[in-house]
Image (cartoon, rainbow, N blue to C red):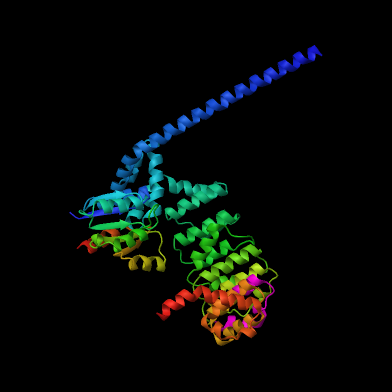
Amino acid sequence: MSNASAVSFETLSLIGVFITGLLAVVGTSTVARSVLSARRDNRLADVRPQVRQALLSRMEATDPGWEAWVGGLSGTERRVAEDLLEEYLHRIRGGDRESLQQLGYALGIGEKARRKLHEGDHLERRRALHWIARLDIDVTIETLEATCGGHPETRAAAARVLYEQDRANATEEGTELLLRGTGPLSVLGMDTLYQLNKLSPDLLFTRTKESYHEWSESRLIQVLRVIGTAGPASPDTPLDWIGFLFVSESPNVRVAAANALVGYGWHDGVRSAIEIEQVRTDDSPPVRQAVYQMLGSWDDEASVNALRNALRSESNTRAAIDAISALGERATSIPESELTPASSAARDWVLASTEPTRSETEQ
Amino acid sequence: MYSILIADDDEEMRELLRFKLQNGYDVTAVADGEECWRYLDENADDLPDLMVLDVMMPGLSGYRILDRMRDDERFDDVEVIMLTSRGREDDIVRALDAGATDYMTKPFSGNELVARIQRVLR
């Protein structure tokens, strides 16, 4: 028993010494790394003003002589120059930008970006694409598809390059890259999809018609949101299929469809494709809310009648508020006896909330 | 020599603007909205001829500064060029309504900015 206690005590002591030693090593190395990191940051900060001044002066020169300048930089100065280059390419355009792009080549960034696009993992490829966009490096769509087509993040970054470089077929090629696969888009992907299609959602309508049944719910909702915020579609864009979106099993898709079509009251294809009576009696209150907003924006006789009828059947107060808001002053002409309790309460609330404005207008 | 006040919370932006303008103008730079307003208030007797004003700054936004300037006749003669990454139509209308002389979006052309300043101060 006493032997066992001695062994146990020795073992515990050894473990204690080991842990103490390990903590000392970890602590020392952490402090050392922090000191080294702080010294490196100080060195970078110390040379930044001189490097900045030299860089900006050369940027404006007729012959900047970037190669010679870069050749004379220390490792620290070169790192600062790369950092400043990235900062300034993000902020300026025009002749100064073109001059700085030549600095990017002199620093070897252009060559490295081309290499990493082919050899790197997907994170390195994204970084390479960032520089390809910043330096306006000419990369063919075939190369982008071959090197970046396999991962949604690199596809989004490649599409962004097409947009940033203002390529002739950027909308078609970039949209195709982004909408490959069926999953949701990243934030960059969604913003790029919007930037590429913001003037006209015609292509997005076409792609939605072709693929909405294959896309994930998230993807479909994202594309509908882009459609809803983009400019108007052409009058001859075929949209007679759009009613299918309102029979989706997902209320989120039906909401997104109504939101996307807010500005489409003028489009015959949309108006003929949507059964107003069917969509305004949707089972889901959030869908009805979105539909009321859509009908309110359309503001034609059929839509106004649908909104009036909604107040005679609506059981959800929140949805009734949207219907009344969409009708505006016209909501006051419906006899109280015809309103549902929810619509009556909602009308009282809306009228009370707009009372100060009405009084001000009368004054 | 005309004087210009740069108000931008982005250090590299301030340095870039200072560099582009330093040869033709007396340039001062401030790093946020509160500092900008303090500078204007404390230098009301010797105001800059023109401001290059960012919209999104900590403390006070560029819009708030413009609103305050519009409500205070001491600043009636200060020209303001807004320089911001917010390029939507309603942002531009908001700035011009609030009294901005001109509006430029980032990324910007330094030469274009200088030309616009020259036109305003002519």
Q: Quadrant of residue B120?
A: bottom left
Q: Quadrant of the N terminus of chain A?
A: top right
> Quick one: B54 or A172, which is closer to the camera?
B54
Relative to A205, is B76 on the left or the right? left
Outermost right residue? A1
User: Measuring 64% from the left and 72% from the top, which residue is drawn there?
Assistant: A287
Q: x and y percent of residue A6 in the render?
A: 75, 13
Outermost top residue? A2
Relative to A8, is A285 on the left or the right? left
> Quick one: A264 or B41, which is closer to the camera?
B41
Magenta stretch mostly in which secondary structure?
helix
Q: Quadrant of the C terminus of chain A?
A: bottom left
Q: Is residue A187 above or below residue A359?
A: above
Determine if the magenta segment contains residue B70.
no
> Quick one: A61 or A88, which is closer to the camera?
A88
Determine if the magenta segment contains residue A280.
yes
- Residue A202 visible to an observer of this rendering: yes
Q: Quadrant of residue A210?
A: bottom right
Relative to A99, is A199 on the left or the right? right
Q: x and y percent of residue A270 in the render?
A: 59, 80
- Residue A73 visible to an observer of this rendering: no
User: Measuring 41% from the left and 49% from the top, which residue is drawn there?
Assistant: A86
Q: Which residues are drawn in magenta?
A: A267-290
> Quick one: B74 or A195, which is closer to the camera?
B74
Q: x and y percent of residue A83 in the render?
A: 41, 44
User: Measuring 29% from the left and 49% from the top, which residue is drawn there?
Assistant: B29
Q: x and y percent of residue A17 in the render?
A: 64, 19
Relative to B22, is B9 on the left or the right? right
